[in-house]
Amino acid sequence: MKKLLYQFDTDTHPSVFDNVVGYDGGADHISAYGAVDAGNAAPLIDGAIFTRAPKDKKNTAIFIGGSSMAQGEALLDAVRTRFFAKFRVSVMFDCNGSNTTAAALVACLAHGRNLSGKRAVVLAGSGPVGQRAALLLAHEGARVTIAGRKLAVVQSACDAIKSRFGVQIHAVEAASAQERGAAIQDAQIVVATGAAGITLLEARQWQESEALELLADANTSPPAGVEGVAMSDKATLSHGKLLFGPLGFGALKLAVHRACVARLFEQNDLVLDAEEIYAVARSLEQARVTPHGGVAT
Ligand SMILES: NC(=O)c1ccc[n+]([C@@H]2O[C@H](COP(=O)([O-])OP(=O)(O)OC[C@H]3O[C@@H](n4cnc5c(N)ncnc54)[C@H](OP(=O)(O)O)[C@@H]3O)[C@@H](O)[C@H]2O)c1
C-alpha cells in the first residue's frame, strides 16, 4: 500500500522545500494543496480519513505548512477537530520549518548543557521559527524574551504561545540595532530568527557582551543575521562565546524533518508539533555522539 502524504499549505503556493523533504522522509506520493485554511479544509481531511481500513490508515498522513503560524495553528485545530473515533491519520505541523528548525537549533544549544535559569533573547522572534525557538528554550528552563520591531506584534506572538502552550514569554520592542544591542545586554543566550537576509546585530554588539555564552543565527540567506557568525558554525568558540550558524544546525534540521515524516507512517494517531518534534531532535543529536565521546559527522 502506498504511503500518501497530503501537504496542506496556508500559502497560495505549497512549499517546494516541504514537498522534497516529504519524499526524502519516505512518502511514496505527495499531493500538495495551497491556500488551505481552517474554513475550507474539511473535504480534504475527510478524503484522508474515510478512504482506508483502520489497519491501513497509517499509510495516509497530513503535513501542515505555510508562513502564518496563526493560520497554520487554526488549520491544525480544524484537522484535529474533524477526526473522530478511529477516523484519523497522523499529522505533522511545521509552518515555515518552524518546529524542525527551532528544534534542531535548541537541541544543539542544549546538547550537553543546562540552559535552566539562563536568560535567553530571541531577536525578531515573532515569526514561526522564533516563536517555536522561544517556546523550546523556555521548555529547557530558560527565561525567554522575544524582541521585535513593534511591541504589539511581539506581544501578540507571546500571547499566542501562552494560550497554546501555557508558557510565559516576555515581549520587548527593539526596532533599531542599538535597541537590539540593549535588549541582549545581560542575556546568556541569544538566538536570531529574523527574516532572510536581515542583519540584526553587529559583531561588536555580541563580542563585547560579558554575559553572553551561546549565540545562534537561523538566517540562511546572506548577509548573516548576526555579523560574525559563519553559516557552518557549530559550537565554534569566538570571543569566549559558542557560535551556531544556520548550516551548523541545518543538517540536524533536515534529519529531524525526514525522521518525523517517516514516523507519520508508523501509526495513524500521531500529532507532531513542537514538543514531539523537539524530542526527535534531542534524540538524533544525542545519537550523533559516539560511545568514545567524539561527535559523528
Ligand atoms: N537554518 C535553517 O535550517 C532554516 C530553516 C528555516 C528557516 N530558516 C530561517 O529562519 C529565519 C526565520 O524564519 P521565519 O519564517 O520565522 O521568518 P519570518 O517570519 O520571515 O521573519 C521573522 C521576523 O523577522 C522580522 N523582520 C522582518 N523583516 C524585518 C526587517 N526588515 N528588519 C528587522 N526585522 C524584520 C519580523 O519580526 P518583527 O516584525 O516582530 O520585527 C518577523 O516576524 C529566516 O531567516 C529563515 O530563512 C532557517
Image: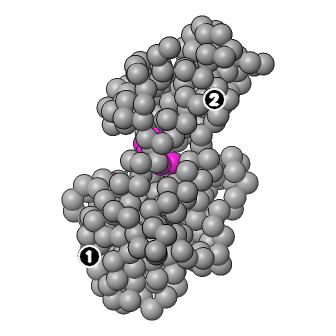
Q: Amino acid at mark 1?
A: Gly
Say which residue label 1 marks. Answer: 228
Instruction: Please say if 157 is above or below 20.
Output: below
> Residue at the location (51% across, 40% down)?
260
**Is 213 left or right of 138, judged from the image as shown?**
left
Q: Which residues are magenta?
A: 94-100
Name the spot of residue 63 as percent of width and height, x first.
Answer: 50, 30
Decide whether residue 99 is among the magenta residues.
yes
Mark 2 closeness class: few <14, some 14–19, many ≥20 residues within 10 Å: some
**Is 244 left or right of 281, judged from the image as shown?**
left
Q: Residue furthest front?
A: 292
Instruction: Please say if 27 is above or below 141.
Output: above
Proximity of marks 1 and 2: CB atoms separated by less than 8 Å: no
Residue 86 in view (yes/no):
yes
**Quarter of the C terminus within the rendering:** bottom left
**Is 143 left or right of 237, judged from the image as shown?**
right
Residue sitting nearer the eye, 189 or 60? 60
Which secondary structure, mark 2?
loop
Name the spot of residue 52 as percent of width and height, x first.
Answer: 61, 10
> Residue at the location (41% across, 21% down)?
28
Instruction: Please say if 189 is above or below 129.
Output: below
Q: Alpha carbon of mark 1 to alpha carbon of mark 2: how far?
A: 44 Å
Q: Quadrant of residue 13?
A: top left
Q: Amino acid at mark 2?
A: Gln
> Residue at the location (49% across, 60% down)?
287
* Majority SS type along the magenta span: helix
> Residue at the location (46% across, 74% down)?
292
Which secondary structure, mark 1?
loop
**Residue 267, which numbered label?**
2
